[in-house]
Image (cartoon, rainbow, N blue to C red):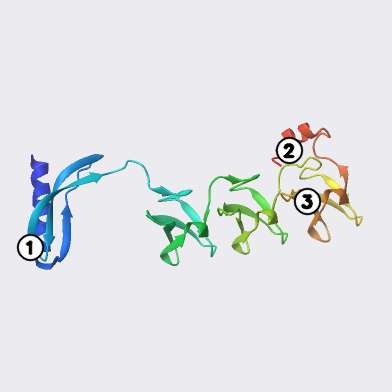
Amino acid sequence: MLNRFFKTVFISVIATASLANAQNSAIIFEETTTTTTRSVTVLKGGLEVGLGDVRVIRPHVRMSKGNVRIGSHVITSDNRSGVVTGIFVQENKIVIKDSYYGNRTWNLHQVAVTQGCIGAHCVGDMVITSDNRKGTFAGYFNDGRMVVTDSYYGNRTFAHSAVGMSVGCTELFCAGDRVITSDNRSGVVSGFFPDGRVIIQDSYYGNRTWRSEQIALTEAVCANIFIERVRSCGGRY
């Protein structure tokens, strides 16, 4: 009874304050149950014109849209990290807050999620980009584009085909294998692109990309039988 008394006083105070200023407004009394029906005082032109009922629904799930939800950590298409703070229920738009701009509204296709996997790449994997920089796979967009974070550039966006794994195996090579390339330079396999191209690192050129037929294997880090190489090296391709 005492709790209900304080709720009634609270509503009365709001109603009194609204009478002087409200033009078209409504005071809705909400319970904390999942579904409840309570009286609502409707104010119009500063006058109390009647009583009605309102059905208040409180879903016990976090609001989500697409593959993000309120509280999700995301990366926007201008490569800024932020948190989802709001969702437009009837549109494919969400509100994202970052440390520089505060809240901004984005379309869903402009937002990269920072959890899960796309193809053989999982968020948190060490990768090599097509400009031969090492970084961390930080997130991905709905269209397959990937965000890679490195120590120099921060977040950058690449096509899926432009991001190579730096661990694991293909059917022919594993990261760490020693090889000789078709221009007769010795090097080490440092990664793979999704289309099977192999990244070789040598002491002079650094990382370069080669087709598998351009590489001669000289020292394998795992057994020669493919299934054993996959088990030993953790390959996902």
At 83% from the left and 57% from the top, the residue drawn is: 203
| Residue type, mark 2 in image | Cys
Location of residue 106 (image quadrant): bottom left
Q: Mark 2, mark 3: which one is toward the viewer? A: 3
Residue 66 image point, x, y percent: 47, 49
- The answer to whether residue 212 is above or below residue 234 is below
Residue 79 image point, x, y percent: 54, 62
Location of residue 220 (image quadrant): top right
The circle drawn on residue 131 is none
State yes or no: discs 1 and 3 in contact (Cβ < 8 Å): no
Q: Is 168 left or right of 28, judged from the image as shown?
A: right
The circle drawn on residue 47 is 1
Residue 53 image point, x, y percent: 15, 47
At 10% from the left and 51% from the top, the residue drawn is: 51
Distance (Cα) linking label 1 and label 3: 74 Å
Most foreground residue, 67 or 178: 67
User: Mark 1 packing: few (<14 Cα in 10 Å), some, or many (20+)?
Assistant: some
The circle drawn on residue 197 is 3
User: Mark 3 packing: few (<14 Cα in 10 Å), some, or many (20+)?
Assistant: some
Location of residue 163 (image quadrant): bottom right
At 81% from the left and 41% from the top, the residue drawn is: 172
| Residue type, mark 3 in image | Arg
Earlier sequence position, callout 1 versus callout 3: 1
